[in-house]
Amino acid sequence: MADLFDAFASTGTVLAEHGSPVIELVGARKTYRTGSIEFEALRGIDLRIEQGEYVAIMGPSGSGKSTLMNIIGCLDTLTEGDYRLAGDDIAELDEIDLAQIRNLRIGFVFQQFHLLPALSAWRNVELPLMYRQVPVGERRARAAAALERVGLGDRVANRPGELSGGQQQRVAVARALVGEPDLLLADEPTGNLDSQSTADVLGLLDELHQQGRTIVLITHELEVAQHARRIVWVRDGLIQSDEVIDR
Amino acid sequence: MSWLETLRTGWSAVRSHGLRSALTVLGILIGIAAVILTVGLGLGTQKDVSAQISSLGSNLLIVTPGSSTGTDGVRGGFGSAATLTRADAEALASRTNAPDVSAVAPEKSTSASLEANDTNWTTTVTGTTADWLDVRSRELENGTFLTAADDTDRANVIVLGSETATELFGTTRVVGQSVTIGDDDYQVIGVLAAEGASGSEDLDDLALVPLSTASEQLVGGNARSSVSTIYVQAASTDQLSAANQETTTLLLNLHGITATDSADFTVSSQDALVSTATAVYRTLTVLLTGIAALSLLVGGIGVMNIMLVSVTERTREIGLRKALGAPPWAIRRQFLVEASVLGLAGGVIGAGLGIVAAHVLPGLLDTSIVVSGAAVAGSVVVAVGIGLVFGVYPATRAARLTPIDALRSE
């Protein structure tokens, strides 16, 4: 099983390094059915995000941006169209394969942090590695390095309840980074933070971008979105605009 | 995630809800302790009963008098008739009449007060013959037993049980001492080795005299030639039923009775006693174990209940783990392990409690409880099994949650 995971990981990384886009959506449609009522959340989206890009996806509620984020995050599959993540077609994978893909390719940062309150920062961060059979010693070292990277090297033993909101979100960023994913997917990462912590976390994302990470940020705040280099506006299940911000 | 880690995660989840887990474990624990105790009690009682019965001696047939019918046609109780005589016993002892019988010991008992050096002790004095020692599988601690000559001579000799000797003289080294019953002095010729109690009968508090002496000096009257019980020993276990047949036929002939139905005596064997007693106790044990098992079932439902609560409470955790790449089987395994940990804790603590109770209770209740290793190991396995079985539904529910819905739940 571990070998299989590794095989997946290496293939993916190699493909991404050779210039395939990290995200490639072609004619993406998602239809929800509730009884006889159909609702088209995505109505044909084409989107390419290259290696190393920092993209903000914006849109009002009901625009389909949450659905888009679920699709990009492999938490859900398309009704129609193609989705390639780091070169691999994953539009019609089953639950177990999706779990593998999420584990290997994607680092999530959520609005509510979603840290496990009973576990120390260290053990929270090592969770993704546990699901891919990394031996304890290596796991601990990588988790410690990730926490060091987000500036919490001295808080490894603290539980989430003993950390401020900003620190908790940094632990979550460390957890997203620890597995060396192709894509960092942040869903309203500053939605629950005060302005100082917001600045901290966004600063951290900026740094990660400068180091070559691919980041997709979902937000409804323009201030936050402006940290990205490219802003994609979604409305009524379609991409309304896609602009590169010049600095 | 390795098994060890899953186990550790399960343990910390169980521990993080201490009281709740403890109460759930209590349900299992009580059931397991109850099963171990009832099984132990059943085994202990069976052991007691067979020890009691086999202490009478193997290959043994017991002939007791039937009921008597008075001149007015009123039948007396079982054993009330004085239909068995010394002559019956002597006839049975003959190899020609009963070739499968190896030894015969008639008994004629009465309660009497024994006196020695101003000490008084009332016990059962039994008149019997030299074969008694062999037939009843007893041994002497010191001295000699009654002989055929003692019987012929109507000798005033007596063999004491160890307890009787101790009560009268303060020691069991009393061969050569004198005991007075009524007006007659008896010389102590032997003391029986201690045997312990058998039900209501104390096997160590008794006195034995030659049958002829008992008939003449202790009982007297019309009942002089009658005996209360005749113990018949078959030559071997295989010959027991043949010996039974011969005894019955011979006694029917001697008593001039043609119909087996109207026999004025009863022949019972050890086998029959053992199997009856065993059957009774087995039924009781099964019944009690069933009740204990029922309480285990209730404990199992408790586990399921708490696991369902746990799944609902931790929906977000499940969602997060799935988002981080936990496949459904990992989630299912995590909750199954948690449920098994509850079961295991209940099983181990319950087994411990059962073992402690099995050592404490016999002293208080005067029963024996045999803790069988198989019952203990079995109970712990069953407890873990109960955790697993009742954890399947909650765990499957957890595994089926979709990560999106689970993450969004409040």
Image (cartoon, coloured by chain):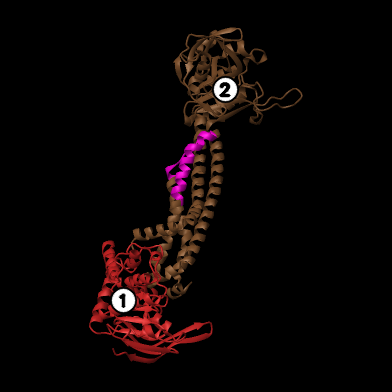
Query: Quick check: A19 above or below B377?
Result: below
Disc 1 is placed on an element classified as helix
Q: Residue B271 appears at what percent x and percent y?
A: 52, 33
Nearest-to-viewer mark from 1 and 2: 1
Q: Which residues are magenta?
A: B346-375
Chain A as rendered: colour: red
Query: Quick check: B38 above or below A191?
Result: above
Q: Amino acid at mark 2?
A: Ile
* Quarter assignment of residue B209: top right
Q: Residue B212 appears at what percent x and percent y?
A: 57, 12
Considering depth in this image, is B330 or B82 the residue closer to the camera? B330
Residue B356 in the magenta stretch? The answer is yes
Q: Amino acid at mark 1?
A: Leu
Shown in brown, the chain is B
Residue B304 in the magenta stretch? The answer is no
The residue marked by circle 1 belongs to what chain? A
Q: Residue B196 appears at what percent x and percent y?
A: 50, 26
The residue pinned by badge 2 equals B230
Q: Is residue A51 visible?
A: yes
The residue marked by circle 2 belongs to what chain? B
Q: Quadrant of the C terminus of chain A?
A: bottom left
Q: How many marks?
A: 2
